[in-house]
Amino acid sequence: MSKLPKAYQFIDLSDYGRPVARVIARSLKNTSFTPVHVTIGFIISGLFAIACIIYGNYVAAAFFLIFKSILDAADGELARVKETPSYTGRYLDSVADVILNLMILIAIWFITESSILHTLLAFAGLQLQGTLYNYYYVILRNNCKGDTTSRIFEDSTPDAMEGEKQSVVNILFRLYKLCYGFFDKTIYFLDRSAAKADKFPKWLMTAVSTFGLGFQLLIISLMLVAGWKDYIIPFFIVYTIMIAVFIGIRKML
């Protein structure tokens, strides 16, 4: 199942793992595995990738980063095929992503001569890029009556859905706000009018999808395997400039 009606679907460069994710989800549909179990799986895959980076096994690191990206899509796919959407899964997924992103960049800092300041700048850039992509994508999904588990403005604790505990949703929402609040507010400040926009051309969404986490992990994987580990942190710092470019294009439309 797609997050968007067919008429609004675009080429999502960050979502290359979706076909495999759907196969995984279908294979788990009639089992006791839940979307949260799959989320835990991508956390483990991410940790394996980090260990491989530190120990210099970059091909294995690339495999686990890409596998992590596939599982990151599979948990949502499983929630849709089982018809069990939840805020628990949505916030656990997001909180795990931001923590793993920081750990991945710290691992890259550890094996290169980059400064910790540049590493933190790259992390901030990575998160701002992903936040802009998610901001536009969630607005588009809401405008065309697609998947609505994610909200445009995460400014209040949502009511727990059937099958989940409100206390768990409350805790995970607070963690989400702690991890993403600054980035969400920054992107909203830069492009607050996007929430009222009714036009997101497919070509623009495809371009902005280079900010998606799946594509970011693919770039890191390719650069590790190519022996360009020293350029990973500078790349994400410089590529953050494209935020202004995409926002400028969106506003002109």
Image (tube, helix red, strand yellow):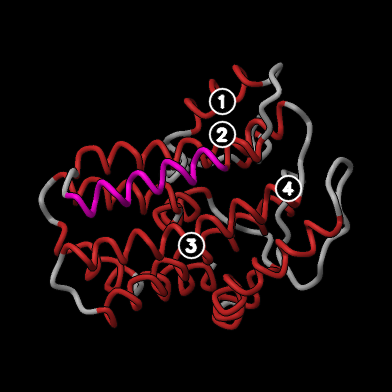
Q: Which residues are magenta?
A: 40-55
The disc label shown at residue 22, or none: 1
Q: Looking at the image, how many numbered discs can be counted on the residues?
A: 4
The Cα–Cα distance between marks 1 and 2, rounded to whole angstroms, is 6 Å
| Quadrant showing the N terminus | top right
Local packing at callout 3 (Cα closer than 10 Å; few below 14, some 14-19, many 20+) is: few
Residue for point 71% across, 23% down: 32
Circles 4, 1 touching at the beta carbon (< 8 Å): no
Chain-order first, disc 3 or disc 2: 2
Q: What's the mark number on residue 99?
A: 3
What residue did someone put label 4 on?
144
Which residue type carries mark 4?
Cys
Which is more toward the observer, 7 or 165? 165
Front: mark 3 or 2:
3
Write down the quadrant of residue 134 in the picture. bottom right
Under circle 4, the secondary element is loop
Left or right relative to 4: residue 159: right
Within-10-Å neighbours for mark 4: few <14, some 14–19, many 20+: few
Pick the front one: 242 or 236: 236
Q: Is residue 206 left or right of residue 64?
A: right
At which x and y percent is residue 152? 71, 64
Looking at marks 4 and 2 on the same chain, the residue that comes earlier in the sequence is marked by 2
Assign the magenta stretch its main secondary structure.
helix
Residue 235 in picture, x, y percent from top left: 24, 66
Disc 1 + disc 2, Cβ < 8 Å:
yes
Q: CA distance from mark 4 to mark 2?
A: 23 Å
Badge 1, how many Cα within 10 Å: few under 14, some, many 20+?
Answer: many
> Mark 3 or mark 4, which has the lower sequence index?
3
> 220 and 243: which one is in front?
220
Residue 75, above or below 250: above
Q: Amino acid at mark 3?
A: Ile
Look at the image and say whether residue 54 sits in the magenta stretch: yes
